[in-house]
Amino acid sequence: MNIYIVIPTFNEERHIKNVLKDVAKHKLPIIVVNDGSVDKTSQVLSKLKVKSEKLMVLTHRVNLGKGAAMKTGAEAAFSRGADAVIFMDSDGQHKASDLPKFIKALESGKYGIIFGSRVLTHGVPLVRFLGNKFASILISVLFGIYVSDLICGYRAITRNSYEKIKWESSGYAVETEMAIKTAKYGIKYCEVPVETVYLDNVKGVTILDAINILTNVIAWRIKI
Amino acid sequence: MILGLQLIAILFSLSLIYLALLNYRRKEIDKSEFVSWTAIWSLTIFVVIFPEILRSFAQRFFITRLFDMLVVGGFVLVIFMVARIYVKIRKMENKFEEYVRKDALKDEKKK
């Protein structure tokens, strides 16, 4: 099975090098989408690209958001013949050592989407834990799909499933939209446990993003 | 006699006519848009000076006070404009996103 790793990134000059080093051990093709970074992420990526043939860097000239970057990465991968892609965050939260779990689930051929689930009881800030659980229950009630870690960016999708659920969200609402559309199109899914490390308190989903996601959920309930 | 509130409304309308004129001179709006905005604000000034002409219209909708009708009308207008602007911004956002994403993919193909 031809699997690509897609990593959307925005202003991650501190972590991106280590993340890519970690992922490169698995010898899979990697697509990094630099989503309009204004720090030295571009320079770091240019240096790494020279060293690695397996690394492809795509650049958004302006910051569009995580969802848009994931879409660009997925389309580039599928146009190069990928059968599936695995999305990872670029801030070092996700460990490449969990990749085999996704690969195994994809290669079983049973699932169209594989959601990574962080162990939310360890090391996750309480507010995030409660917010995440509330979102999971809300989506379960409204759309009939329960994903224990709704906003975890570590997930995999096959080409067929991608064609069905092509998301519209350009920001952090993408993960929720993927779950909702998984339910809508009846795509088989599973969850795999992943380790997570919180390195940066400022980044990630903020309260404003959460409000935006909630507004989108209401809109999707009406539309989908 | 013109009341203070009417005076404010007239001054506001006049300044918006002036703004439309400035936009037209800077070629930010075309002639038809300038004429439309001038007509809308001139009509507003006329209604503000002679509010009684709306009385029969208000009675047809069972609105007893003229002021209530103007408030309701204002709300309807604002909601309509916000909805229209929202749709336009959404369209622009989608086009912009598509352009940036295609540009990123095109760049990679060139290499």
Image: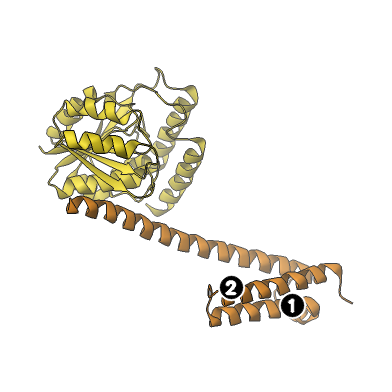
| Residue A66 shows in this picture | yes
**A26 lies above or below B106:** above
- Residue under the point 32% across and 33% down: A89
State the residue in front, A135 or A3.
A3
User: Mark 1: few, some, or many residues within 10 Å (few <14, many ≥20)?
Assistant: many
Left or right of A167 in this view: A221: right
**Chain B takes which shade in the image?**
orange
Amino acid type assigned to the residue bearing label 1 in the image: Ile
- Residue under the point 44% across and 47% down: A216
Q: Which residue is mark 1?
A: B45
Q: CA distance from mark 1 to mark 2?
A: 20 Å
Q: How many marks?
A: 2
Contact check, label 1 and label 2, Cβ < 8 Å = no
- Residue under the point 20% across and 37% down: A49
Give me the disc on residue B23.
Answer: 2
Amino acid type assigned to the residue bearing label 2 in the image: Asn
- Residue under the point 40% across and 38% down: A139
Q: Of helix, strand and loop, which one carries label 2? A: helix
**A23 lies above or below A166:** above
Judge if badges 1 and 2 mark residues of a common chain. Answer: yes
Q: Of helix, strand and loop, which one carries label 1? A: helix
Q: Quadrant of residue A187?
A: top left
**Chain A takes which shade in the image?**
yellow
**Residue A67 coordinates in the image, percent (x, y):** 34, 45
**Residue A155 coordinates in the image, percent (x, y):** 27, 34
Q: Dot 1 falls on which chain?
A: B
Q: Dot 2 falls on which chain?
A: B
| Residue A185 shows in this picture | no
Q: Considering the image in quadrants, where does the N terminus of chain B appear?
A: bottom right
Residue lying at the far right of the rendered structure: B1
Among numbered discs 1 and 2, the one appearing first in the sequence: 2
